[in-house]
């Protein structure tokens, strides 16, 4: 049979639309898995300091690899989070909704500016949000500037949160996503809050970006030490 080189490729299947039961099922699995685990804190005083600020909003910042456990920890609080407009993002948006988050759809170059403006506006009447510091596509463990701009324009402090588990699976993705195994020990490490002053210069924003990056990497080391694992960058 001859191949028609002008034939358009088949459209990628939208799993969230074709099988709407999957995101809630995945969310339930997330809840059940993490409920078997023992959670520990590193830098609990930093977590409590952030709690004292509320009901004013705060920004929880974390590496992309920690996403599964972060979603569980901050579940059912109505926190905002940003999800890309891709088809994969459709599944993620449905998943985070099932875990009690409010997703904003956007990504750099594809609604990112509009999503940022909407996020800033929504921050005024919310408990805050959770955002990946290294973005949706990396590079891994390199903080991006967008999160700092959100903090500056919303006047919300950033709370760096790192995660480690003594027993876990590591996915073969760009970020090496961490998923704890059943009955694992999970350490959540909280670093001191970072504030980006309104009207900060580009150099000051870069300084805050580097501070966030160091805080998350140092926090990962502390969390892995707490559960008896060696940190590997």
Image: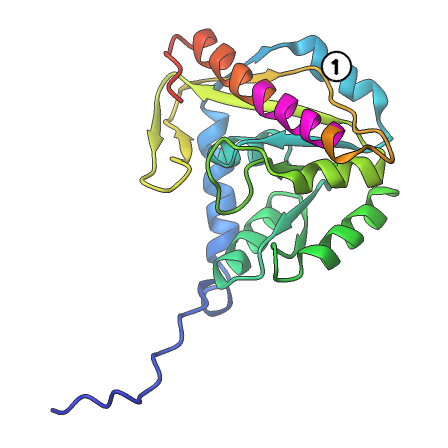
Callout 1: 10 Å neighbours few (<14), some, many (20+)? Answer: few
Mark 1 element type:
helix
Please give the range of residues in magenta. 204-214
Seen at 37% across and 19% down, the residue is 232
Q: Quadrant of residue 233?
A: top left
The residue identified by callout 1 is 48
Q: Is residue 44 left or right of residue 137?
A: right
Residue 43 position, x and y percent, is 63, 9
Q: Is residue 60 visible?
A: yes
Could you tell me if residue 77 is visible in this image?
A: no
Position of the N terminus, as image quadrant, is bottom left
Magenta segment main secondary structure: helix
Q: How many marks?
A: 1
Side (left or right) of 59 relative to 71: right
Q: Residue 165 sits in which quadrant?
A: top left
177 falls in the magenta region: no
Residue 212 within the segment the image draws in magenta: yes
**Residue visible at 36% across and 27% down in the picture:** 181
Say left or right for 85 vs 208. left
Q: Residue at x 60, y 43 (%)?
A: 99
Name the residue at 47% across, 7% down: 226
Examine the image and state in which quarter residue 195 appears.
Answer: top right
| x and y, in percent, of residue 34 in the image | 48, 28
Residue at the left extreme of this rendering: 1
């Amino acid at each position: 049979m001859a191949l028609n080189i002008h034939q358009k490729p088949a459209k990628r299947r939208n799993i969230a639309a074709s099988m709407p039961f999957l995101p809630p099922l995945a969310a339930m699995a997330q809840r059940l898995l993490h409920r078997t685990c023992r959670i520990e804190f590193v830098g609990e005083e930093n977590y409590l300091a952030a709690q004292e600020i509320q009901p004013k909003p705060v920004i929880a910042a974390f590496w992309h690899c920690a996403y599964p456990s972060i979603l569980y920890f901050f579940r059912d609080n109505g926190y905002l989070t940003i999800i890309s407009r891709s088809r994969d993002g459709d599944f993620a948006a449905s998943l985070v909704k099932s875990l009690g988050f409010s997703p904003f759809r956007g990504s750099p170059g594809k609604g990112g500016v509009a999503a940022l403006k909407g996020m800033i506006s929504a921050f005024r009447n919310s408990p805050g949000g959770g955002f990946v510091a290294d973005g949706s596509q990396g590079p891994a463990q390199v903080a991006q500037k967008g999160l700092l701009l959100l903090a500056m324009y919303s006047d919300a402090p950033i709370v760096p949160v790192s995660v480690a588990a003594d027993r876990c699976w590591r996915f073969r993705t760009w970020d090496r996503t961490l998923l704890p195994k059943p009955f694992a020990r999970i350490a959540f490490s909280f670093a001191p809050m970072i504030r980006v002053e309104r009207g900060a210069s580009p150099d000051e924003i870069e300084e805050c970006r580097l501070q966030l990056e160091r805080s998350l990497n140092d926090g990962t080391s502390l969390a892995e030490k707490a559960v008896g694992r060696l940190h590997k960058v």
